[in-house]
Each structure stands twice: as C-alpha cells, then as structure tokens.
Amino acid sequence: MGDTNRLEWIIFQLLVTSNSRTTDLLELIVMDRLLPIVAGQSELAGGEIWRESFLMTEKDQRYVSQNIVRINPNYVPPALLERIVREGEGIGHVLRASGTSDQRQMIRNGWRRTEEIVDLFGQPYQLSFGEAGWIPFKEYKLIFPPYEQCGAHILEYFNPDMLRRTMESALQFTVKEGELV
C-alpha cells in the first residue's frame, strides 16, 4: 500500500467509524459545501418514511455519498421533521443549523464490494456513483432525546473517488511567500 492509499484508507476509516455529524466531516474532506439532493421519498406501511438522497459538492457537482433512510415520524421532533421530510432538507444540515442534540448508535460500518451493496431491507441496491471495487459505508440509528426510540435509521455509502479528487485538488496548492496560491 502506497502512502496515498494508506492516507485514503485512514481518512475513510475515520469517516465510517465517526459517531459525530457525518456531513460536517464530509465537507471538511472535500473542502466544499455539500448540497443534499432528495432522489425519492415515500411513506411505508406503519407510517415510516423511506428516503433516498445524495450529497453533492456545490462547486463541481460530484457525488460524495448516497443515503438510504427510514424515518419514524413519532420519534423525530416536529420542527426537524418538517424541514427534513416536507421541505426536503438534508438531515445533517438541519441538525447543524438547529443545534438539536442527537445520540447515534452505530450498527455496522466498513467496506462492501459493489456486488454486496444492499438497502436497509438487505435487498440488492444500485449506487449512482458507479464505483467498482470496495465501497466504504456506515449504518447507524439517530435518537433524538427525550425520545428513546430510533427516529432515523441511516445507511450511507461513500464515493471512494471523492477523496482522490480532493487530494488532487489539494496538491495543486503551493505556498509562496506565506500565502496559498
């Protein structure tokens, strides 16, 4: 493993094991603001909401992650639910802007081969960023106190290419007389 591959692996390990706001970490990694794109949203039997979304970089519109979420409206604060479900805002952006506290319970994380990609029901799933090989992911539950039950069950797949592109961009910077050029 070369130094670049080792660095990529370390950064992705930090990402998939992080138990904090993923969107904030992703924005730091890609050095850009992320835009949430809701690809689909529907109500499931029992009142839960199924949502598929992407995070894309603002500047060059590249996919950073693809997210599958089951939301239980009974355990999400109404103001958050309004912004996330009805207004289509990104969960990470809403949490950051509102200052809402949450608890995260990691279910699983790691790397999956393209042919092992599944949704929250364990069914085969197709990613839009079309990477071959190993895909980093994490699956976790969000709990919003004072509720004790899961408000959102999230499965995130991360585009491995996002880090290579970021590293290429970072290498283009040079230091000249104490300023970034």
Image (cartoon, helix red, strand yellow):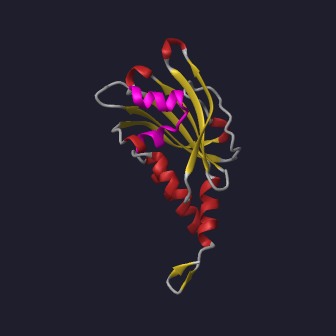
**Image coordinates for residue 65, horizontal then vertical, percent:** 59, 44
Q: Which residues are magenta?
A: 78-96
**Image coordinates for residue 35, horizontal then vertical, percent:** 58, 46
Q: In the rendered view, would you say 98 is above or below 43?
A: below
- The majority secondary structure of the magenta stretch comes to helix
Residue at image x 56%, y 57%?
Answer: 32
**Image coordinates for residue 72, horizontal then vertical, percent:** 45, 22
Residue at image x 56%, y 68%?
Answer: 3
Q: In the rendered view, would you say 69 is above or below 33?
A: above
Q: Residue furthest bottom?
A: 177
Q: Looking at the rendering, which quadrant does residue 141 occupy?
A: top left
| Left or right, residue 108 beside residue 143 | right
Residue at image x 67%, y 38%?
Answer: 127
Observer-nearest residue: 14 or 171? 171
**Image coordinates for residue 159, horizontal then vertical, percent:** 62, 48
Q: Quadrant of the N terminus?
A: bottom right
Q: Is residue 93 magenta?
A: yes
Q: Looking at the rendering, which quadrant does residue 116 occupy?
A: top right
Q: Does residue 1 appear in this view?
A: no
Q: Is residue 82 magenta?
A: yes
Q: Does residue 5 appear in this view?
A: yes
| Left or right, residue 120 beside residue 169 | left
Observer-nearest residue: 168 or 53? 53
Residue at image x 65%, y 31%?
Answer: 125
Observer-nearest residue: 43 or 154? 43
